[in-house]
Image (cartoon, helix red, strand yellow):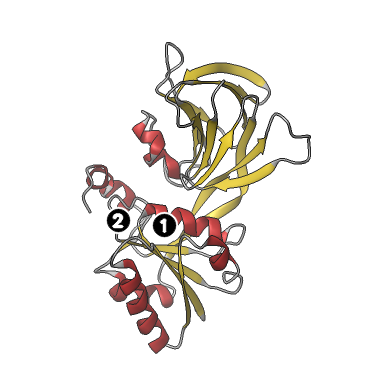
Amino acid sequence: MKKIGILYHPMIKDAYSMAEKLERFLSSTGVSVWLCSSWEGEKARVQVNDTDLILSIGGDGTILRAAQAVVPRLTPITGINLGRLGFMTELSADEAVAKLPALLAGEGWVDERAMLEAELLSADEEQGTAQIFYALNDVVVARGAIARMVYVEASVNGELLTTYKADGVIVATATGSTGYSLAAGGPILYPQARDFLLLPIVPHLGSAYTVVLPPTAVVRLCVSTVHQAALSIDGHINLPLSNGAVVSVKHSSNKVRFLRIHPETSFYSSLEQRLKGKQ
């Protein structure tokens, strides 16, 4: 590897000092290194083109921002966990320097994850002016600041499924199945699965089940509300939705790659500990 980017969480006290420590170590091995706050997505994005690896320092939220900076490129990401759960991270802070030489020597393996593509079309927009977003974790259509439920008409492949009366609706990848979707009562999918989930958030007198959809499915969500609703992409891209807004979600051709060093089975062996908030 000739060039490595380091994205750090700007609000975690030890993240920047860890980034500097890794920069010094990598530079001493002859690797070119750049540093950037994970909250400066555009600044990071312009540096990714010829980068061989992204080191993400923080937690899962930092990795989600790193994924947004990388897409549509296939630059792999290795997460160093300074957060709490760290489902997507690979290394603890104590392991980082010890394990990096093995990764640089090509001893790791690539963990490829599916993404979702979300198309937003507001009620007053014409066809062709839709906004496109990519999500590694989830696409959420939900109520806004006012605590009133929204009505979301959900169709799959052009066929009406139901109209959710709820706080919102989650469309989650297998990666996102251990996030907000899990908190809303959804199942955990195998991390590399291409299937995705559709489920409501706190449904009122209606459908409370989760639907597992194949990668060929296209979900159409039409919002009906007298108050402002919201669209959230991976929890950090947030946009207002008005009555009549339509969000279409499908499996994306883009993917995110993680470079890992721990055995592939470590997801299962550490699942219970991570769910309990332990490392």
Residue extending farthest top: 205
| Residue designated by label 2 | 83
- Amino acid type of disc 1? Thr
The answer to whether residue 37 is above or below residue 215 is below
* Residue 15 percent coordinates (x, y): 33, 67
Q: Earlier in the sequence, mark 2 or mark 1?
A: 1
- Amino acid type of disc 2? Gly
Going 74% across and 34% down the picture, which residue do you hit? Answer: 125
| Residue designated by label 1 | 62
Few, some or many C-alpha atoms within 10 Å of disc 2 (few <14, some 14-19, many ≥20)? Answer: some
- Quarter occupied by residue 35: bottom left
Can residue 216 be seen at all in this image of the molecule?
no
The answer to whether residue 182 is above or below residue 1 is above
* Residue 36 percent coordinates (x, y): 47, 70
Can residue 117 be seen at all in this image of the molecule?
yes
Going 33% across and 50% down the picture, which residue do you hit? Answer: 267
Residue 173 versus residue 240: which sits nearer the camera?
240
Going 60% across and 69% down the picture, which residue do you hit? Answer: 46
How far is mark 2 from mark 1, CA to CA? 9 Å
The mark total stands at 2
Please, what secondary structure does the residue beneath circle 1 have? Answer: helix
Few, some or many C-alpha atoms within 10 Å of disc 1 (few <14, some 14-19, many ≥20)? Answer: many
Q: Are marks 2 and 1 in contact (CB under 8 Å)?
A: yes
